[in-house]
Amino acid sequence: MAFHRYDAVVVGAGGAGLAAAIQLADSDAHIACVTKLFPTRSHTGAAQGGIAASLGNTEEDHWEWHMYDTVKGGDYLVDQDAAEILVKDAIEAVVSLEHMGLPFNRTPDGKIDQRRFGGHTKRHGEGPVRRACYAADRTGHMILQTLYQNSIKHKVNFFDEHHLVDLLFTDDGQCCGVVTYELKTGELHVIQAKAVIIATGGAGRIFKITSNALASTGDGIGIAYRRGVPLMDMEFLQFHPTGLRKLGILVSEAARGEGGIVRNNDGEAFAARYAPTMKDLAPRDMMSRFIWQEIHEGRGINGEDYVLLDISHLPPEVIEAKLPDVTDFARVYLGVEPTEEGIPIQPTAHFTMGGLPTNNDGQAISDPSGTIIPGLYAAGEAACVSVHGANRLGTNSLLELVVFGRRAGNQAIKDIQSMEFVDLPKNPTAYVEERIARIMSGDGKERVAEVRSAMQQEMTDNMSVVREESGIRHALESLSSLKNAYQHVTVDDKGKIYNTELMEALELEHMLEVAEVMAHGALARQESRGAHFRNDFQKRDDANWLRHTMIYKTSDGIREDYKPVTITRFEPKERKY
Amino acid sequence: MQVTLRIKRFNPETDKKPHFEEYVVEVEGTDRVLDALNQVKWYQDGTLTYRRSCAHGICGSDAMRINGRNRLACKVLMKDLGKRVTLEPLLGFKVEKDLLVDMEKFFDQYKSVKPYLIADAAPASGERYQSQSDRAAFDDTTKCILCAACTTSCPITWTNDEFVGPAAIVNAHRFIFDSRDQGAAERLQILNKSSGVWRCRTVFNCTDACPRDIKVTEAIEQVKRALVLGEVH
């Protein structure tokens, strides 16, 4: 076992983690940034379409319009004080990325160019507005590269290929460090810290059809939960309407922002029937349901479970300059030529709206009244502030990473000045060592991949775009038996060096728990709101459910609690586009 | 269809030298090489080791030699490879285990060219402006995902430990030709050393290997020209 001590440790080196790490490094704090990959492999790099900010570079726009869209897009489950911070800070955040060197596409007069995106409107819903700042269809790639480049400039100290395996707490609940598993050596590392910032991303890999990287296994979310930290709003998992058929690979909403149209088997641009004003730029939860409805009513292509995204009418130079990657994906993976034919698409598990509940400064909280968990912070997809509520708008995630990653970093800078290092628990690695030993010596009646793929199939079958009680109960029963099956898994690889099989086995344990929390929240929430659509409760129910779900792991099983939604400017209304 | 994967294996804990092992997998033509590798790891032999993450060619984790050519395992489909597929680790870097190589040297080379914007204080408010044509001048090299396919395809890097390699030059190019950047002179000085661009023999392997279709050789040539002519634009 190796031991390290830092003022702060950031876990995760995607957009949120790097944004936090750069703030901390800039303050001369002694910090480490831990990632199970290399920083540039983080899933932020797969984001395509843009980052929202009401710069107004190509047409009139205001932060207040952006806030309205964010709140309405989130089906009013958004905490509006947090959303106000998001949209106001957006302008400075995007400008600061430009100052760091991000190569945004430019307008003819040299400003950052902006384009349309789902759910972003002018004058509270009058029609689409150009708000998404972008770098072709690789905006996430450019944000990740730019932040990584700046972390080199600021000499951030990285622990590459260190897998988070535990969070350490004192008896009175203060987070005081992390345990990592170094892939290269198989050694456990204890990193003591005054501030631990969780920025480990989402958990889309719990589903079979997903746009998420194989690494998006919800590590920080699952490990915090196991250690008693509540998870908030986990039933809200966004399905992106346009994933490549069967593969789930993301085809950016930018394709529709630039004029792409989704068509059914009759060639009909059906979104206009459901959302007459925004049409194909209705928010993702709605677009996914429209597609589900078309398929359900037999208008999928040849009656099958997909529809077509048509960009063939766009000028070739627009495709070349603004959508090169997504057209390449269609060519490489489906053998489809998007300049001539429709791209087969279907909804794909995309974004974890829920996560570790935090206040507006990234401090993790332990209850509905907002009690701070000392030493623990979270930002980005692993966190739930909540700026996305029940459904995130496209381009608000890259924005969240930068805005709230920096806020968490800044808060940690403040806190560590007045904090002392506290004693670690005795035998801080004992728990992890026991788990590893159990996996290494398991009876091997079950294989990790079989348990995992059964979980993924179950979640895609019963926890997708449309849910109902019987299906969710089925998922819960299935997850319960898969947790039992997990007790019998072992690994072929008994070695120390780059034992990536062991890593997958460790991930699966908390994936099963995170899946269970999602299903539990979905069963309890007897209404339809945003990405959570219950066929047996099709209406939103503000009287009973305008509140955040908080789920705890306790020695007596799962416990639920609920937290009120903060409403400042916009009273809930019916959501029409 | 049934395909035989011939995979170069090396486990430093048990092996003195690498050897090939064969695995038969049942795949669809549209499966990626990565899917076939996952099938082996998940259902046949969990000890098989490689890096992977996004599985669609954007994170840069799974560059390897596929039938002798540097490719991303997640961007090559099985139908394009035939019934026997040989998979080997990238050349020129120390093999840590099976298809997984030590990337430390690669990232050190990258860092050596100062891959970040070097510029005077930004405007107090608002973004810097940049014309569309200035932005286009370095568009191609912004696509780099640091997968190392180019650098490890270059015969010079196989025999010369000093050469920074194509990927580092691509990332230097991305800043040298960015009109907002003022660090061109110091980067060009770095690339003018014996470890820099003059080692390049214009073999074009790098361009062939790039999974992002970056015109790597052309970028290197542009850097050479900037050195000779003493001007960037």
Image: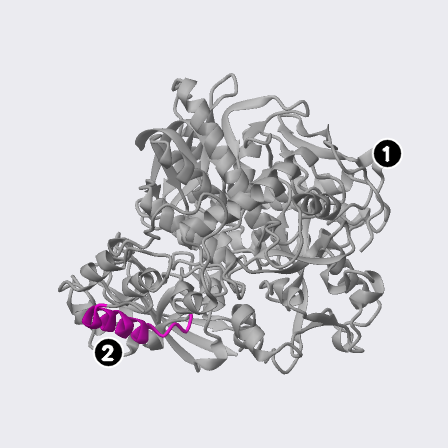
* Residue that badge 2 annotates: B202
Q: Are marks 1 and 2 in contact (CB under 8 Å)?
A: no
Answer whether residue B113 is magenta in the image. Answer: no
Q: Is residue B222 visible?
A: yes
* Residue that badge 1 annotates: A543
Q: Which residue is at 52% across, 51% downward? A: A448
SS label for mark 1: helix
Q: Is residue A430 above or below residue A530?
A: above
Q: Nearer the viewer, residue B120 or A144?
A: B120
Q: Which residue is at 83% across, 62% downward? A: A276
How would you classify the magenta stretch by its main secondary structure?
A: helix
Q: Which residues are magenta?
A: B212-230
- Image label count: 2
Which x, y percent locates residue A241? 69, 61
Quadrant of the rendering where the C terminus of chain A is positioned: bottom right
SS label for mark 2: loop
Q: Is residue A343 left or right of residue B170?
A: right
Quadrant of res B224: bottom left
Which x, y percent locates residue A130? 65, 58
Front tag of 1 and 2: 2
Q: Is residue A439 above or below residue B64?
A: above
| Gap in angstroms between the C-alphas marked 1 and 2 | 70 Å
Q: Chain of mark 1?
A: A
Q: Is residue B77 left or right of residue B194?
A: right
Answer whether residue B220 is magenta in the image. Answer: yes
Q: Nearer the viewer, residue A157 or A334?
A: A157
Which x, y percent locates residue B154? 25, 72
Callouts 1 and 2 on one subunit: no
